[in-house]
Image (cartoon, rainbow, N blue to C red):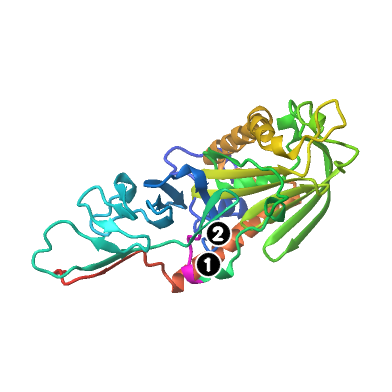
Amino acid sequence: MSKRNVLRQAGSDGPPSFEDSKNRRQRARAAGMNPNYWYAVEYDAAIKKGEAKEVIFWKESIAVFRGMDGQLNAILNRCAHRQLKLTGGEVKGCRMVCPYHGWEYDGQGRVTHIPHDLFGRKMPKFRVHRYPLKVRYGLIWIFPGDPALAESRPLPHIPELEGPDAWPCVPFDNTWTAHHSMIIDNVSDFTHEYLHRAHMPFSDAKLLDMQVEEDRVSLTYDSKIGGGKWMAPFVDQSKVKTDRIDLCYDYPYQWSNTGGKIKHHLFVLPIDERRTRAFFLFYFKALKIPMLPITIPRWVMIPVLKIANKVIFDPLIGEDGWAVEAEQEGYDACYDAPMAEINPAVHEFQKLTIRKWEEHLETAKSQPAVRIEANCDAPA
């Protein structure tokens, strides 16, 4: 048998943890994402008044609920009493109610009402963690890390999606059984043209430039963009330079720019080592009516993009989803196989992912997160 096993051996517990990883790929595939950034977790329109939803950031369950006043809140999805998930309960007025004993939590995570007997004690003080929350670009964003850092870490700024002349955009998402680093590798690595041979969103890609600076890896590919049979009819080649694309892993976000007129952002929500929700925002300054040199009016672009998401992007991104899920399955079986990656950009993506997770782990050693607080006169 070779010194490095190609297949997982019988009795193995699977891929190693971050601490036990032997090489860069293993460390990248076990790393979480630094929580001291804003993460998209759900659509604003998906949570109505009086509703709550569970979202998960790296194995931590969060209850996002909207009170009857319309205000959104995000608190730890655990009752301080018996640790049941609060999302199993209901929203009463502007409070989240635990389904077990009816304890009520306000938007700050404080227990404000206990409906049963307190056994002669005064109202105890219980609190679960509250997460800073904002809404932008139709998405709900949560800051899972140190709340004191939330205001100093800006949300992604996409000027094309703001103001009266905002470009049309219809976000969509997928949840895949794959580690978040595999998805980042996929969307910025243009060597997988063969996977998309039926749609041809890009072709003949050659890496022209790569810049690594602080928390960013920027790439430029010489490539034919949007030349497939479904996309090409909508792109006015006389007005958009489609022979080059800029991409960036601007941790923890990813984006691309083709000719200043075709752009996208990807926001990943890491659920755990094998699950990731990915929010895609494709936006265009203008598209043309197929076979005519006429720009599609701005007022009909939203319905056009809704159709495009179903007809063009869902099948295309679905191929990427199939690939990363297959890669996860392959990695689980062959995590100790020799590394065979030749794209230098992928090496840099993984280095950045590892470094940012190491930064978080180092901070967590000295400043462990306190998620549930209790102060009452009950016996220990």
Q: Main secondary structure of the magenta part?
A: loop
Q: Are marks 2 and 1 in contact (CB under 8 Å)?
A: yes
Specify start and end residues of the magenta stretch as a single range: 143-148
What's the CA distance linking mark 2 and mark 1? 8 Å
What residue is shown with label 1?
150
Residue ID at (48%, 53%):
17
Quadrant where the image shows the C terminus = bottom left
Q: Position of residue 51 (x, y in %)?
A: 38, 45
- Residue 192 occupies which quadrant of the picture? top right
Q: Is residue 142 above or below residue 301?
A: below
Q: Position of residue 219 (x, y in %)?
A: 78, 52
The answer to whether residue 316 is visible is yes
Where residue 282 sits, quadrant-wise, is top right
Name which residue type carries label 2: Trp
User: Is 283 left or right of 377, judged from the image as shown?
Assistant: right
Q: Is residue 224 left or right of residue 317?
A: right
